[in-house]
């Protein structure tokens, strides 16, 4: 397959113009002024905002229209919606179009691509940008969101080298640092460092929000609570999909976390100050090493 784009794709379709899709569009427009970006979103208000803000050049109201003549098709919807999108676009994509996603889980997405795309799966490039913001939606999009952030590209047995390289160049043009991983390693690692922390943050806020005197607790909550619970402000639908998609990893990690809580509870019940302090010290030192 010869490189049809030379330097960069000319027409990009963004399916799901939210924070990630919108920021990718802005960054690509900054890197290559001559590209055309078309957007599709099931939320018409969000789609209109994307056009008004200059994130995309044009709006379409069907998936078939979105992918028509697109060089690169980025699927930036919640992971639970990716398979239906792939099913719908499969018969409308051009013979050279590259399809990519930005989902936070990968095993389910790759299986969906294999089932939906037929031979076009050779032009499917699974990607996970490690970037985000406190608020979701296209209005939070930023052209520098991916600058010096990691973007994980999944190496598969079916993706051709050229589509992989073209998508890699796109993300590098956005300022990202490229990492590669296997699908299983990806879902295991991000189950621990991303998906589990979101569950814990949601759980703490849920616990307080469902108490009779919740207002009192929230009134006195300060910066520590704000820092720990920032990610509980994330999109519930998106995180429902991620949680279900990475179920096997998360069940193992939740059990591990519960075992640690039991250990801590036992130390507290027995007034084992040495064990408690050592527990905190190990965590503090690891946090310092990571953040420096």
Image (spheres, helix red, strand yellow):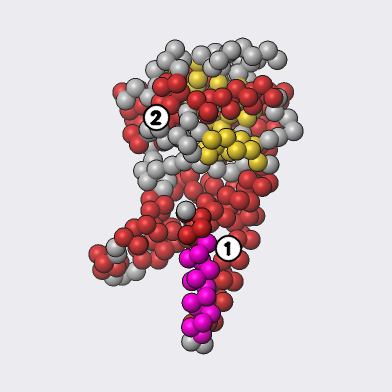
Residue at figure coordinates x 37%, y 32% from the top left: 142
Image: 92 above or below 24? above
Residue 282 belongs to the span the image colors magenta: yes
Specify which label sits upstream in the sequence, 1 or 2.
2
Image: 190 above or below 258? above
Q: How packed is label 1: few (under 14 Cα within 10 Å), some, or many (20 or more)?
A: some
Circles 1 and 2: CB atoms closer than 8 Å:
no
Q: Pick the quarter of the image with the N terminus.
A: top right
- Percent position of residue 264, x then y: 52, 76
Residue nearest the viewer, comparing 171 with 198: 171
Estimate the spatial distance between the alpha carbons at disc 1 and disc 2, rounded to whole Å.
36 Å
The residue tagged 1 is 254
Residue at figure coordinates x 31%, y 23% from the top left: 52
The residue tagged 2 is 143
Disc 2, SS: loop
Magenta residues span: 272-286
Residue at figure coordinates x 50%, y 22% from the top left: 13
257 relative to 135 in the view: left or right: right
176 relative to 205 in the view: left or right: right
């Amino acid at each position: 397959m010869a490189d049809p784009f030379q330097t960069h794709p000319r027409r990009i379709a963004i399916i799901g113009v939210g924070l990630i899709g919108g920021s990718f569009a802005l960054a690509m427009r900054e890197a290559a002024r001559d590209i055309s970006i078309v957007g599709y979103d099931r939320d018409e208000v969000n789609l209109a905002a994307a056009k008004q803000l200059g994130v995309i050049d044009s709006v379409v109201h069907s998936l078939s229209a979105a992918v028509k003549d697109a060089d690169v098709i980025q699927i930036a919807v919640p992971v639970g919606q990716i398979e239906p999108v792939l099913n719908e676009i499969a018969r409308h994509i051009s013979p050279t179009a590259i399809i990519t996603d930005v989902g936070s889980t990968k095993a389910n997405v790759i299986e969906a691509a294999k089932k939906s795309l037929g031979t076009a799966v050779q032009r499917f490039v699974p990607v996970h940008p490690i970037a985000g913001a406190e608020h979701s939606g296209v209005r939070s999009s930023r052209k520098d969101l991916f600058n010096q952030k990691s973007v994980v590209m999944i190496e598969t047995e079916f993706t051709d080298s050229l589509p992989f390289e073209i998508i890699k160049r796109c993300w590098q043009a956005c300022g990202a640092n490229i990492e590669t991983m296997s699908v299983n390693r990806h879902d295991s690692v991000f189950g621990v460092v991303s998906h589990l922390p979101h569950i814990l943050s949601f759980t703490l806020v849920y616990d307080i929000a469902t108490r009779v005197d919740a207002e009192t607790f929230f009134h006195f909550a300060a910066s520590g609570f704000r820092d720990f619970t920032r990610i509980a402000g994330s999109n519930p639908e998106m995180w429902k999909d991620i949680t279900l998609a990475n179920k096997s990893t998360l069940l193992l990690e939740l059990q591990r976390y519960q075992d640690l809580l039991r250990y801590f509870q036992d130390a507290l019940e027995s007034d084992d100050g040495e064990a408690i302090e050592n527990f905190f010290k190990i965590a503090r030192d690891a946090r310092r090493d990571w953040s420096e």
